[in-house]
Image (tube, rainbow, N blue to C red):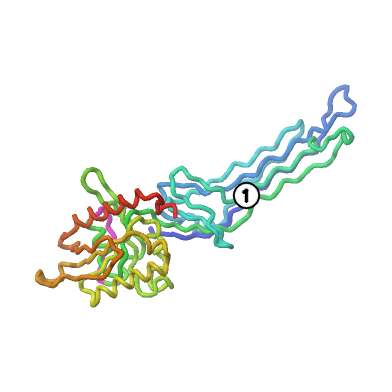
């Protein structure tokens, strides 16, 4: 199934019920008093976390969600039935924005979280509420209010511990397939990865962390070139980044600098995350080849691996685990950014 990570939907809260105009009729009471009840409260719409969902596919075709209206007020001071609230499930990591203003309404980050996006209308008052000592037989009543109507945008940002950034064919998918049980598509042509992939990396002592592999980044990705701009959002919530630089690149320094520029241009938050430089495809160079080096003063280290030959992977996993552990202990968790 394709990863649908954006959707725009119209949400409309339910209308409140109208108040009732009624007068009670009792034996031996020639003029009964007003007893019209209030209208019910219109139903509201909430966005709710659903841990078992992984895509926004459900909102691609059904783009208008409307909550039920409330019942009208009844005689004998009976309040109309309130509408039943509607809960729209979304995957964890979904950001909710106002489609017209772009303002962030909220983010779904926890399994038990729900966010109000369209409030139901208030019920109108019945004529019993208008009775006063000098106005004992009111015929006034109020219609119910309309529910809130707005257009919202849902943006899915995958929640992972480590994000892999690199050019097309840098070895990201191969690395993910070797260190986890994920099975991304691997081929010898660029842009093999067309959607993000997640994999869980297991270590000793029951330790584990989640790695996200996104499509390759090219120069100008933050402007929409290639596939990077569309998917960089999926590494915004990662705690740690790994910049993959293939050893068969003509100039590894230029590759690393380009990846850093694209991350900075897309988001200051993304550029400020702890990161490590990973030289990939070490199996392509002879054993006596001189060691490659890049100037990466902000990196937590430079590691050399070969996913195909299973070289350096244990050290890489331990380094990433340590970085994830340290990042998770910081006061400001990146998941809340």
Q: Nearer the viewer, residue 40 or 129?
A: 129
Q: Main secondary structure of the magenta part?
A: loop
Element type at mark 1:
loop
Q: Is residue 37 above or below residue 155?
A: above
- In the rendered view, does 51 fall on the left or right side of 212? right
Q: Nearer the viewer, residue 111 or 236?
A: 236
Q: Position of residue 198 (x, y in %)?
A: 32, 56
Q: Residues within 10 Å of mark 1 (few under 14, many from 20)?
A: many
Q: Nearer the viewer, residue 104 or 78?
A: 104
Quadrant of the drawing holding the N terminus:
bottom left
Q: Position of residue 77 (x, y in %)?
A: 75, 32
Q: Position of residue 171 (x, y in %)?
A: 25, 66
Dividing the picture into quadrants, the one containing residue 242 is: bottom left
Dividing the picture into quadrants, the one containing residue 71 is: top right
- In the rendered view, does 125 fall on the left or right side of 227? right
Q: In this view, which residue lies farthest toward the front?
A: 297
Quadrant of the drawing holding the C terminus:
bottom left
Q: Residue at x 77, y 44 (%)?
A: 142
Q: Position of residue 259 (x, y in %)?
A: 33, 70
Q: Which residue is mark 1?
A: 13
Q: Is residue 150 above or below residue 121?
A: below
Q: Which residues are magenta?
A: 179-188
Q: Residue at x 19, y 71 (%)?
A: 292
């Amino acid at each position: 199934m394709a990863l649908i990570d954006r959707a725009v939907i119209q949400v409309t809260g339910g209308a409140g019920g109208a108040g009732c105009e009624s007068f009670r009729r009792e034996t031996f009471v020639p003029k009964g008093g007003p007893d019209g009840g209030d209208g019910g409260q219109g139903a509201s719409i909430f966005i709710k976390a659903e841990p078992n969902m992984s895509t926004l596919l459900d909102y691609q075709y059904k783009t208008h969600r409307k909550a039920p209206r409330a019942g009208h007020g009844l005689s004998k001071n009976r309040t109309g039935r309130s509408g039943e609230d509607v809960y729209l499930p979304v995957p964890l990591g979904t950001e909710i924005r106002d489609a017209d203003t772009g303002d962030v309404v909220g983010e779904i980050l926890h399994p038990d979280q729900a966010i109000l996006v369209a409030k139901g209308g208030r019920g109108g008052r019945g004529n019993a509420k208008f009775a006063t000592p000098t106005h004992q037989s009111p015929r006034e009543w109020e219609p119910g209010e309309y529910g809130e109507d707005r257009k919202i945008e849902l943006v899915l940002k995958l929640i992972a511990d480590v994000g892999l950034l690199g050019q097309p064919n840098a070895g990201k998918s191969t690395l993910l397939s070797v260190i986890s049980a994920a099975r991304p598509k691997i081929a010898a042509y660029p842009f093999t990865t067309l959607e993000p992939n997640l994999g869980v990396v297991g270590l000793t002592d029951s330790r584990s962390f989640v790695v996200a592999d996104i499509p390759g980044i090219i120069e100008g990705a933050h402007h929409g070139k290639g596939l990077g701009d569309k998917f960089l959002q999926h590494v915004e919530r990662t705690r740690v980044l790994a910049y993959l630089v293939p050893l068969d690149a003509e100039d590894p320094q230029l590759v690393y600098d380009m990846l850093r520029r694209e991350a900075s241009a897309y988001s200051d938050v993304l550029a400020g995350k702890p990161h490590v430089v990973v030289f990939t495809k070490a199996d392509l160079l002879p054993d006596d080849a001189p060691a490659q080096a890049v100037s990466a003063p902000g990196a937590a280290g430079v590691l050399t691996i070969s996913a195909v030959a299973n070289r350096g992977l244990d050290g890489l996993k331990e380094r990433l685990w340590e970085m994830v552990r340290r990042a998770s202990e910081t006061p400001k968790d990146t998941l809340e950014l």
